[in-house]
Image (cartoon, helix red, strand yellow):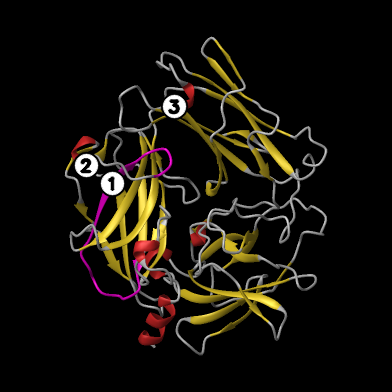
Amino acid sequence: MKLSLQLFCLLFISVPIFAQRNPDSTYLPNIHGIKFYAYGNQLSYPVIGPGSTASLELHFDDLDAKIRNYSYTYQLCDADWNVLDLSPLDYIQGFTQNRLNQYRVSSIAQVRYIHYQAMLPEKNCVPVKSGNYLLKVFLNGDTSKLAFTRRLLVLDNQVPIALKITQPYNSQLMRTHQKVQFSIDKGKLNILNPQQQLKVVVLQNYRWNSAVTGMQPQFMRNNIYEYNGERDFLFEAGKEYRWVDLQSFRYQSPRIESIDKTNLPMDVYVRADPQRSQERFLMMQDYNGGYYIQGSDVNNAWWQGDYAKVHFTFYPNSLPLFAGKDIYIMGEMTANALNDSTKLEFNEAKGVYEITLLLKQGFYNYTYVTKEAGKKNSKPETAITDGDYWETENSYTVLVYYRSLGNRYDELLGMATINSKFGTQ
């Protein structure tokens, strides 16, 4: 059974590690259940201030169930997530890498694993410059033996941001898109060339693969820069995320079709998901693509929660539907990745698209998106799979990066988040 699990895990790492460049990547097939978030809130994004300590939680599982020597470090990147050629001593105070010493052998769970966790940053290894960082977890003190990487934002909040969500004026977009308008106050920043020194990035639900960037301010007056161009920072609104409740594998939650415990890991079949692009909009509470680890029948899901092979099915209204396009399942549970491990395969006999993921007990949000086949940099779209509706509840985050003259890195000096339904957060 253990060999079967190892073979199944290998299905999730189908691209050589040297080809993977997504900052949120998993490099070892035995690593699952990665969560990296602000202390006490599994649905939050990892953001800290320069010099902050013990304000983030890191969790992950090694399904080989062998105690290993995992370490971590931080690597500073520019605003586009390109790794900078700087010494770690320039941006890390203390040791440039640390060992992950807190682990626990799983109990109760049928699938065996070692659970690792840490409170980060630790006092002896602290990022001290603001900007984009990679958290890199690796084996045996060798940074080339990566287990996984995750994004981390270090914010030195100096730039106030005023933002709002509006309905586009364009009649072709007003029912399907949402527009982010905002202004920033540069204060005492010495900005001589905004195009070179200033960069703003806007994220929808913290999805970097659909980020909008490269826009310039429409107006500049005194210290205020206005970003409100008619066609700037437009986002497909999508639809509320789909969900599946996996908090128990003993009982079937409403969206579970069946559970087969013949094999290990067990097989969980989610009720087939219909194409929703022609359905009318229905407001539902969701977590904007997030997920949390939790078990209704265990005391502590971090080391008692079980794993299952979870089978998802998407059925289109008509065929052929996705000519020239690939379809992916997307959410935090897949690190919002668009690769072979998240691409659905078409089952001709059934006329449906299918994918199987190895997931831990918890509650999951997800969506289906399409992407132009063979075009690496094309953005994911929900128009065909789910439709786009102006009324959809989404979260938007504005990031402001600044590079002073002669500096070699981009400082993250402003950040603000707003919800399209509930306002600023």
Residue 95 drawn at (x, y percent):
16, 44
> Looking at the image, which residue is at 70% across and 68% down?
323
The secondary element bearing badge 1 is classed as strand
Mark 1 touching mark 2, by CB under 8 A? yes
Residue 196 is tagged as: 3
- Local packing at callout 2 (Cα closer than 10 Å; few below 14, some 14-19, many 20+) is some
- The type of residue carrying mark 2 is Pro
Using the numbered discs, state the Cα–Cα distance from disc 1 to disc 3 in whole angstroms: 26 Å
> Looking at the image, which residue is at 67% across and 66% down?
324
Q: Is residue 162 above or below residue 360?
A: above
Residue 129 drawn at (x, y percent):
30, 33
Residue 270 drawn at (x, y percent):
63, 74
Using the numbered discs, state the Cα–Cα distance from disc 1 to disc 2 in whole angstroms: 8 Å
Residue 40 is left or right of residue 353, and the answer is left
> Looking at the image, which residue is at 33% across and 45% down?
83
For the C terminus, the image quarter is: top right
Q: Which residue is mark 1?
A: 74
Q: Nearer the viewer, mark 1 or mark 3?
A: 3
> Looking at the image, which residue is at 21% across and 42% down?
88
Q: Is residue 180 above or below residue 112?
A: above
For the N terminus, the image quarter is: bottom left
Mark 1 touching mark 3, by CB under 8 A? no
The secondary element bearing badge 2 is classed as helix
Residue 88 is tagged as: 2
Q: Nearer the viewer, mark 2 or mark 3?
A: 3
- The type of residue carrying mark 1 is Tyr
Residue 401 is left or right of residue 348, and the answer is left
- The type of residue carrying mark 3 is Gln
The secondary element bearing badge 3 is classed as helix
Residue 211 is left or right of residue 27, and the answer is right
- Local packing at callout 1 (Cα closer than 10 Å; few below 14, some 14-19, many 20+) is many
Q: Write down the region rendered in magenta.
A: 61-81
